[in-house]
Image (cartoon, rainbow, N blue to C red):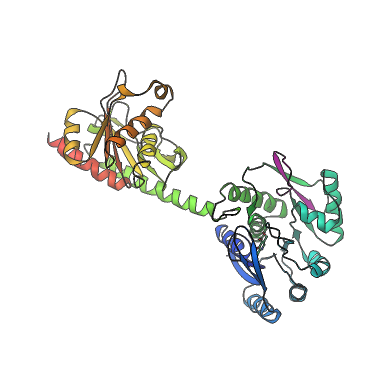
Amino acid sequence: MKKVMTIAGSDSSAGAGIQADIKTFSALGVYGTTVITTLTAQNTSTISDILVVPSKFFKDQLVTTLEDIKPDVIKIGVLYSKSIINIVKNILKNYKNPIVVDPVLYSGTGIKLLEDDSYEQFQKEIIPMSYVITPNLKEAEFISKIRISNKRDMTRAASAIFRLGASNIIIKGGHDGTRDRNVLDFLFKRKGGQPEQILHERLKIGETHGTGCNFSAALASFLAKGYDISESFALANSYVYETLKNSIKIGNGVLVSNPLYHMYNNSEKYKVLIELQDSVTSLEKMTNFFQLIPETKTNFVYSTEKPKNFGDVAGVLGRITNLGINIRTPNIIQFGSSIHVSNALLAATKFNSLFRSAINIRNNQNIIKICENSFRCSKYSRRNEPEESKKIEGSSIKWGVSEAFKKELKAELVYHDGDLGKEPMVILFGYNPKDVLDKVKIILQGYVKN
Ligand code: PXL
């Protein structure tokens, strides 16, 4: 496994600093070691106190960790004091792998994270060690002493920072405080050429906490994995854009960016796909299931926890059909592939948030009789649907399922008897696909006997 060391401050609110770094390293599959410079007492609105780690102990952390675990890349964040800067410089002076320097001067909430009299030392000792330095616009202005209001200023600022000894410079446009629709980030490379730029639409989420740390930690991770500086810039940029889009409201202050979003989201979605696939396979093997497939065919869906929209509901692409007694499934299970049954499930979750799976089956008198004897059922009539709802594709079922649950909050099954040109239908709900399959089996047992 590739290894990245972060030398940075601890953030008790866990949005920035060491905590942001370790989340980012873990999400991107590299091993992170953490050498702590300062402890901050912090929340999403302010930093109330800062404790600088005693120099001797700081040095012990750095030396002991480095002796044993050799990082492929080192990331430097908050250093805070002259004494820490000097230790970092002395210990790392012969270190050959890339060093990513995030020149943190202030917290997003405006608290100083580098002592006034330490900046000179930082500029003299740390900037020249950097393989890449990642200032935001304000930091780039401070370091270069150039006010940046256009691309020419930006290029002049980069030249000034190169003169201080940086090898590559990434200037992040996200914090520029303007109302520009888009955000531009630039990579200036030591070897020259036009700067590389990446443009994103500005997210309307206000100030966020942790983004700068996530970016430099992601950059360090991609460099450690062997991507070059341009590739790492692009990859870190797109990663951070996602973490920003999925920022979370964790306290009363600013939003906190969410570097674990990809991991949670993808692993949960993966589990949903596997479980649904398993149950679809079992369904294919149920000898008599073909008798329950309606004219308009069946879909079988399963959602992530608390689904927000179709994108969170997996289903069978192209539906489950039958050819005579044989069940046919295209064997492609995808998120967003069902409209009607997903809509039914999304409506049902508003009344019972534990429902995550659903299937639609044929509605005839025998089936309804068995259902009414076995489950809590509720019924709606499509004839009562308001005109406005009829006009929107896919909204009938949402309306109907909601009506049915309003009548019977504990329903496990909802049906309607059709309308002109609309086939009558039964929709079964369950906590997971196996739960739905068990209900299907009960119906099938009664039905086949008949
Ligand atoms: O986002 C910069 C930063 C870095 N490190 C620590 C911080 C902050 C911002 O608050 O607290 C420890």
On screen, residue 103 versus residue 160, left or right, reads left
**Where 55 sits versus 11, above or below?**
below
In this orientation, does residue 169 appear? Answer: no
Q: Quadrant of residue 101?
A: bottom right
**Is 335 located above or below residue 99 in the figure?**
above
Q: In this view, does 100 lie above or below 441?
A: below
Q: Give the range drawn in magenta.
A: 173-190
Q: Is residue 204 magenta?
A: no
Depth check: give the residue in front, 374 or 385.
385
Quadrant holding the N terminus? bottom right
Which residue lies most toward the left here?
Answer: 450
Q: Position of residue 168 (x, y in %)?
A: 78, 56
Left or right of residue 150, residue 102 in this image: left
Quadrant containing the C terminus is top left
Q: How many marks?
A: 0
Report the side of 335 relative to 379 (left or right).
right
Q: Which of 373 and 133 is in front in this view?
A: 373
Q: Residue furthest top?
A: 420
Quarter-of-image position of residue 370:
top left
Query: Residue 128: horizontal and vertical position, in percent?
Result: 81, 65
Name the quarter showing ligand 1.
bottom right
Q: Quadrant of residue 26?
A: bottom right
Query: Can residue 110 be seen?
Result: yes
The spot of residue 305 in percent (x, y) is 41, 48
- Residue 187 highlighted magenta (yes or no): yes
Which residue: 27% across, 26% down?
A: 424
Q: Which of 252 and 441 is in front in this view?
A: 252
Q: Position of residue 142 (x, y in %)?
A: 81, 57
Which residue shows up at 73% across the image and 69% down it? 80
